Amino acid sequence: MSDFPAATSRSASANPGAADPPSRLRRVAMYALLGVLVGGSIVAIVRDDKSGRELWPFSAFPMYSNRPGWISRSHRVFGVLREDPTREIPLIADEYLYPIEHSRFYMAIRRMEESGRDRDQALAAALRETLERYEANRKAGRHHGPALRAVRLYELQYRLDPWARNRDRADERRLLAEVAAP
Amino acid sequence: MSRELVRLPALRAAWNRFWFAPASPENLACCRLLFYGGLLYFFGTRDFSALAGVDAVFWKPIWLFRLVGLPKPSAEVLKVVQTVWRFSLAASCVGFLTRLATGVSFVFGSFLLGLLYCFGGSGHSKSIVVFAMGSLALSRCGAVLSVDRWIRARRGEPRPGPSGEYCWPIRLVWVAMTFAFFGAGVSKVRHAGLGWVTTDRLAVYLVRSNYPLVRDSNAPMNDWGLWLARHREICRALAAGTLFVELGFPLALLSRRLRPILVSSAFLMQVGITVVMGPDFDVFIWSYLFWVPWDRVKERVLGRVGDPGLSPEPVVRGSVSSPP
């Protein structure tokens, strides 16, 4: 016997607009999933943690909900070129940070900066790992970036310009941490 | 009190109609085919096993992993899991052993997608996929347009007719998307208040997107955002429109008239954000396919509404009721 409804149930046949509920077991499963979705979503919306500590897969979807100003501060990692230590490149492309995505990488760095007593150790370990991973990916041909001798974490400050004329040079730059290749 | 009691059966009937109105099995089957095909496209070549090589300093498991006690997996485990997931996505797409395939897709997919957020912090662009996979795993989405159906047809089993079985899985994805938009609207009002509309907030976001070392997402497709940011009134109108769509999105569940307006507005809003601000929303955008009445699209495309010769198989019930 088929597991599928070969025809609409009697009630639906009599009235095409009427509901035609599935079996009790399937309804229980459906309501359980719906309950998890609704309950989890309500908790996430009430909690609404903008710092990235979400209750995945539930979320308050807090995109663009904070209060950005025309002065912007961001922390970014730069690589120091092995061939020319006076030059640096920003490590913002996904292929440089692979397999961690750009946004998640900087979320992790921010979390480490905010962590208490282990802050410096954690940051140093993270930067060392970033440098090693960059080089390993470069040697494996996953990106075509230049060879690096060190990585530096900077705090950058921009006064945002409506024409973005200063997009390539920060108004202020402060070195927060540095790790060199062994 | 007595008036409320009178209304209860009507509410219950409306609730049941929303979830279980007889719907064409083709509609759900099209969603299955396109949804899993899309997941294969988005994740088919992604190597999750590379995450095993990331140092423990980045490992910050999400609550679900902590709850189950899942450790940082090895590359070997991840290779097996992602291979099984890819096969299950392909099987779900074509509808082969659909029950098993969709179940495996849900469990393994949730694990792999959750794992992405154990390094750094969680995000929400892929969460809709978990609920869509869960919904399809519990449904009879392989009833038609599937290898399973082909096998059943060879055994002489009749083609299934419209049923409430094919309505609720799609509605569940609608509810998940509704929470996404409504939550986003509530979050804006909560953290920024009406200032989100009355101040330069959107203009600042548009300008930030054009600073490679400031933005937190992909680069925008062009610098039109800068032009928009210099036109305050346009920015404020767009901000107001965004809030209206996000907070009003629950009405898409209730009103047939507002549904196409709200859903297409939300879609255009997200495409607009991708163009001028950068974030690509990847699989979230793909989930809009659940709002498309594929059976009616097919009728329109073939232009043969009501033609009994349309179906290659005997149809038990002639008319296909569309959900309200």
Image (spheres, rainbow, N blue to C red):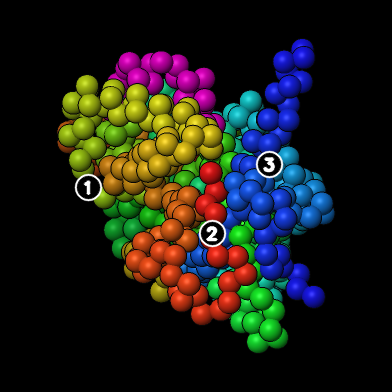
Q: Does label 2 lie on the same chain as label 3?
A: yes
Q: Is residue B274 above or below residue B191?
A: below
Kind of residue at disc 1: Asn
Chain that bears disc 1: B
Q: Is residue B300 left or right of residue A115?
A: left
Could you tell whether A114 is left or right of A22 in the image? left
Q: Nearer the viewer, residue B142 or A13?
A: A13
Magenta stretch encompasses residue B77 = no
Q: Residue B320 carries which label?
A: 2
Residue denoted by label 1: B222
In the rendered structure, which disc, 1 or 2, sits on the residue that comes first in sequence? 1
Q: Where is residue B259 in the image (x, y as percent from the top left)?
A: 44, 39
Secondary structure of residue under mark 3: helix
* Residue drawn at 68 percent across, 36 percent down: B13
Residue B135 location, x and y as percent?
65, 54
How much space separates mark 3 and mark 2, taking CA atoms? 18 Å
Q: Distance between the residues labelled 3 and 1?
A: 47 Å
State whether discs 3 and 1 lie on one chain. Answer: yes
Residue at 18%, 27% (x, y): give it: B230
At label 2, which amino acid type do we have? Val
Identify the residue position indicated by label 3 in the image: B16
Specify the label residue B47 is tagged with. none
